[in-house]
Image: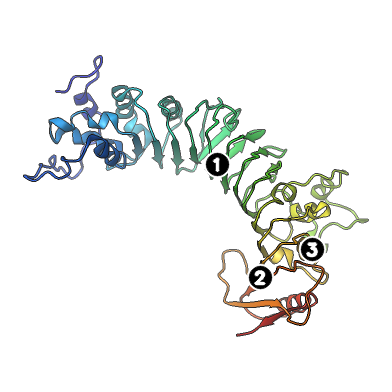
């Protein structure tokens, strides 16, 4: 039996470990032990890719392996064999963390499909333990119909660089990263974001996918060093982004569950300037010249902007449209291609003087296009109204209909000619 601090030992750790359901004995070391000849640092790195239960089991291979698992720099607390829920591994993980102490961590991953209400304190404790171990990349993924409520305490770490969250409720000061000066990459997927502000002076990559907020006001995002932004199908009121002067790439797709929609759009288009306005459109006629998205992303070189037809955000932001001085490539969906005047498309093209490639995607969400035609400036003359650098226009659609023909006719007013192959 391997000795350890206090009354906890490796044997007890094994007792809390789910049994090997195949009943296999521990692997035997061959006469030529090539893996065993590797340095400890490499072996510990390899062990960090295994589920924690499997990594601990290697202590029976030989005397040299007895303590290697204690010093691995990556821990994966995940579903393994018969352990499918957090409750299945609670005692094992508690003993594991006590035995390894505060040895530094590069990565720490928790991933489960089942948890109970009384598991929440354990998951919060394990997360905070990883931070105390100076973890660099922290992942918490919960695939469950309920959300795990993380405590709202601010994270404090000078080492955390990557935070990857799924299936959790974020509240209080949890997304205030003023005490995480090294954080560069934040990913949130299927999370409930109920905070006033997401704030970081160091964040470079932000991804918000299929998240939602129950707040009646907008979540503010302050990340002035952001280089890459993904905002995909946010449910609730679209977050308000503050200036991002070094932004390079942004993908923004407003989903059907976005609350910023015009109630009357189906019957009359966006609420008219002199007619009655719906409650959502009235909220935007407050005299403010602040935009929700466009003035924050205007420095980007590459943009994809996608929206259902009834959403107000882009239409409202275009009233105070900034100039996209650095924009090189732009992808737009059919939201921007509404005739007869094509006001939204015209506006953004006139405010993109450096644009080189334009893609117009006239297919329903989730569908793959069947036809793609390409266009370029006529050799005779270039329009003075849009970018003189525009080299390629791609139009993607499923079938030629009146909508496609009218759009192509409109693009020809800018001396764009299309080739049908």
Task: State the image coordinates of residue 412 (x, y, percent, origin top left).
Answer: 77, 78
- The residue pinned by badge 3 equals 350
What residue occupies the far left of the structure in this picture?
A: 31
Q: Nearer the viewer, residue 116 or 164?
A: 164
Q: Of discs 3 and 1, which sits in the foreground?
A: 3
Q: Nearer the viewer, residue 259 or 141?
A: 141
Q: Quadrant of residue 397?
A: bottom right
Q: How is the image coloured?
A: rainbow
Which residue is at 66% across, 53% downward? 300
Q: Of discs 3 and 2, which sits in the foreground?
A: 3
Does residue 208 sit above or below 76 in this rendering? below
- The residue pinned by badge 2 equals 362
Residue 191 bears which disc, if any? 1
Q: Earlier in the sequence, mark 1 or mark 2?
A: 1
Secondary structure at numbered mark 3: helix
Which residue is at 40% across, 38% downward? 109
Task: State the image coordinates of residue 31 (x, y, percent, origin top left).
Answer: 6, 44
| Label 1–label 2 contact, CB within 8 A | no
What residue occupies the far right of the structure in this picture?
A: 274
């Amino acid at each position: 039996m391997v000795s350890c601090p206090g009354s906890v030992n490796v044997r007890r750790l094994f007792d809390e470990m789910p049994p090997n359901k195949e009943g296999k004995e521990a692997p035997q070391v061959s006469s030529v032990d090539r893996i065993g000849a590797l340095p400890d640092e490499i072996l510990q790195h390899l062990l960090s890719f295994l589920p924690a239960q499997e990594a601990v089991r290697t202590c029976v291979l030989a005397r040299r392996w007895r303590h290697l698992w204690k010093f691995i720099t990556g821990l994966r607390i995940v579903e393994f064999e018969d352990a499918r829920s957090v409750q299945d591994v609670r005692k094992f993980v508690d003993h594991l963390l006590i035995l390894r102490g505060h040895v530094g961590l590069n990565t720490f991953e928790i991933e489960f499909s089942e948890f109970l209400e009384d598991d929440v304190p354990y998951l919060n404790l394990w997360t905070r333990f990883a931070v105390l171990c100076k973890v660099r990349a922290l992942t918490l993924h919960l695939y469950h119909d309920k959300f795990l409520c993380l405590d709202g305490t601010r994270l404090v770490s000078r080492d955390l660089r990557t935070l990857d969250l799924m299936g959790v409720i974020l509240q209080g000061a949890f997304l205030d990263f003023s005490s995480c000066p090294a954080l560069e990459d934040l990913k949130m997927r299927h999370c409930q974001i109920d905070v006033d502000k997401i704030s970081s002076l160091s964040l470079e990559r932000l991804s918000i996918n299929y998240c939602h907020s129950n707040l009646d006001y907008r979540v503010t995002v302050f990340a002035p060093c952001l280089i890459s932004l993904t905002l995909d199908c946010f449910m609730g009121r679209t977050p308000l982004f503050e200036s991002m002067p070094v932004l390079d790439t942004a993908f923004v797709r407003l989903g059907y569950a976005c609350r910023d929609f015009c109630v009357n759009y189906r019957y009359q288009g966006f609420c008219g300037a002199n007619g009655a306005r719906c409650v959502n459109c009235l909220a935007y006629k407050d005299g403010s010249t602040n935009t929700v998205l466009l003035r924050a992303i205007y420095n980007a070189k590459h943009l994809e902007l996608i929206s259902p037809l009834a959403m107000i955000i882009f239409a409202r932001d275009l009233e105070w449209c900034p100039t996209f001085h650095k924009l090189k490539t732009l992808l737009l969906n059919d939201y921007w291609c509404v005739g007869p005047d094509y006001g939204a498309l015209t506006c953004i093209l006139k405010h993109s003087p450096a644009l080189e490639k334009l893609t117009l995607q006239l297919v329903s969400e989730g569908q793959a296009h069947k036809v793609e035609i390409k266009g370029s400036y006529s050799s005779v003359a270039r329009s003075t109204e849009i970018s003189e650098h525009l080299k390629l226009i791609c139009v993607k659609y499923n079938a030629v209909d009146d909508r496609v023909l009218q759009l192509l006719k409109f693009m020809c007013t800018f001396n764009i000619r299309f080739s049908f192959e």
